Each structure stands twice: as C-alpha cells, then as structure tokens.
Amino acid sequence: MNLVTALNKKYIPYTGIMLTSAAINNREHIDAYLLSSDLDDSDLNKIKNAVKDYDMTVYLFTADKSRFSERLPLVENYWSIEIYYKFLLTELLPENLDRALYLDGDIIVNKPLDVFYNTPFMGNDIIASTHRVENNTVKQREMLKEAFDNGYRYFNSGVMLLNLEQMRKNYNFQTYMDAVNIWNYEMEFPDQDILNWVHWKKIGYMDGDKYNFIARMGKEAGLTYEKVKEHATIVHYTEDKPWSNGDFHFDIEKLWWDYAKKSSFYDELSFSFINEIMTNNDTEKYVRELQNYNNELLKTVEKFMSMI
C-alpha cells in the first residue's frame, strides 16, 4: 500500500500520528512517501522512529518550492506552500507506482483501508469522496459551472486515491499551473479548486462519511465520539485542530488523541497542549469580545424600545 502526504517541519508530529494510525489499522506493508522542501535527515528519522514497530517504510522526496509563484494564495497557519505539492505528485513519486492514497497530515486512519485502496478506477483519475457542504462558494460555482450543470459533486483533496499510471500520461506540474493562471490565482480553496477543475470529468466516489469524515461537520450534526469511532474509517480534522488550544474543541477530537497516545510524539504534544492552555488567553479574549458585543447590542435594543 502506497501512502503519500506533504508536510513541513511544523507538521512532523501530526504526520507521524497519521502514519501511526494507518500502520495500526492495516496489515499490508505500507510505503509512505513524504513530500517536503524543508525536512532534513533528522526530521525524517523522527517519523521513521514513530513507525519503527510497524510494517512501514518511509521515504522522503524533496519538492522544489521555487517552482511555485509567489502569487499563490497562502494563509498563515492554514494554507502553506505544501498544499500545492499535490501538483508535483506525478513527477516526484517513483514511476513504478501505479496507484497511491494521498492523505493530509490532520487525518486519523481509524479502520483498514484495503477496500478503499483497492477500488477499481474504472477509467477515473482519482477516487475521492464528496465534500459535505450545503453550498459551494461563489468562485467554485464560477469555476465549475459546467461541471455542476452536469451533476458534478465537489470533492475534498485531503483524501485522494490516485491513478498514477493514467495521470502521468495526461497531466504534469504545468497542467495545474496553467489552470491556476487561467483563474488568475483567485481560487477560494486553492489546490482543491484546481484539482476539481482539472479532473472533474474523471472522478470516482466513495462514501465521504466513511472515508473522509469531516470532524467539525460531525460535531455540528451532533454526532459523538463513540459513533464516529464505530463507523468512520478516515477522520479529517480540517479546521479546528485537536492539538491547538486556540481552536474550539469537541469530543470527536478524543479519537485523534487516542492515536496520539500510541505514538512517540504524545509526551511532546500533551506537554505543549497543557502549557498552551495555561498561557493562551485567546478564549478569554473571545468571551470578553462577545460580552462587549452583547452589551452594545443590548444598548441598541433598549434605545429602539424607548423610541417605540
């Protein structure tokens, strides 16, 4: 089984936990391919050490970030240059790989992947899962109008089974950068929008609730840790991060910490998390701002009522 992900130094612990969860839940030998531009041998050894007790081999491939335009949308602590390394997959991965499963580093593999991994491509470039959103953005509706008019279902690029053998014949790095230029670097979900636009005619689908369960959406739907643990194969923490004290937390995040405890990064992360709780006042500031807003709103309502 070939797994692929992209990361920087900051994401070493989270990638290590993602790979650990995959190794725990799959009997097959796993070759894990890491795409990065700033990892060195010591960083690679940290990840290798995290999975040394499992049937997994880890490889590092260097991505040349100078090939990417400075105009590409980046958002600190949210979108880093690494999200665009997906555009280099057909060039960087070994030519003998005919398929690979791409997973973001903020994912937990909770059950065996063999059914998903061995899904027949049936002529498709990518097997993904529908992105559970009620409404696409204005830019997405513009970019993908023809696709949506033909019943297309937008997919999340954090989980993709890649038909590498077919994709090498038809796409390369320049294919994606040409698409970026066509849309004048104005994508709202940058790499994801481009991948949907380039491949929309050749996308197959698996059940998103099972193979790319978005934890935040599960929380909003009232689902619990126990329910998600029982049914979801892949759990994706797309916005609120279990390890970040600055984000809001909910019980589905316990699943991430279950696997973190089984990794070599647990002590480091738990200490960091507790320390951040003791020193970070973001939540206090948010509550204070909310109180101030409510007070101003109350004054407005009182003024309005007095006028009546």
Image (cartoon, rainbow, N blue to C red):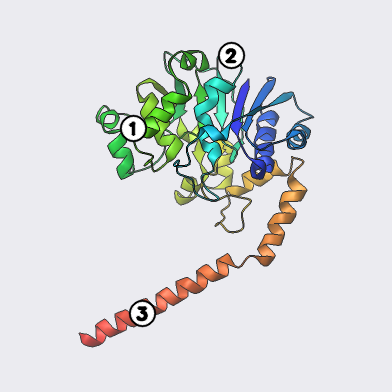
Q: Is residue 209 left or right of residue 153?
A: right
Please, is residue 94 above or below residue 63 in the view? above
Give left or right: position of 292 versus 255.
Answer: left
The residue drawn where x is 44% and y is 19% is 171
Up the image or down, 215 lies above or below 45; here it is: below
**Label 2 crowding class (10 Å Cα cut-off): few <14, some 14-19, many 20+?**
few
Q: Nearer the viewer, residue 79 or 31?
A: 79
Which residue in the structure is indicated by mark 3?
298
Choose mark 3 or mark 1, whichever is in front. Answer: 1
Looking at the rendered image, the disc whose residue lies closer to the viewer, 3 or 2, is 2
Residue at the bottom extreme of this rendering? 306
- Point out residue 172 in the picture as x, y percentages from the top left corner: 47, 21
Type of amino acid at the residue the image marks with label 2: Glu
Q: Disc 2 or 1, which lies upstream in sequence?
A: 2
Contact between marks 3 and 2 (CB within 8 A): the answer is no
Q: Residue 303 at x, y = what percent?
A: 28, 84
- Residue visible at 38% across and 78% down in the picture: 296
Could you tell me if residue 117 is visible in this image?
no
User: Residue 5, can we see it?
Assistant: yes
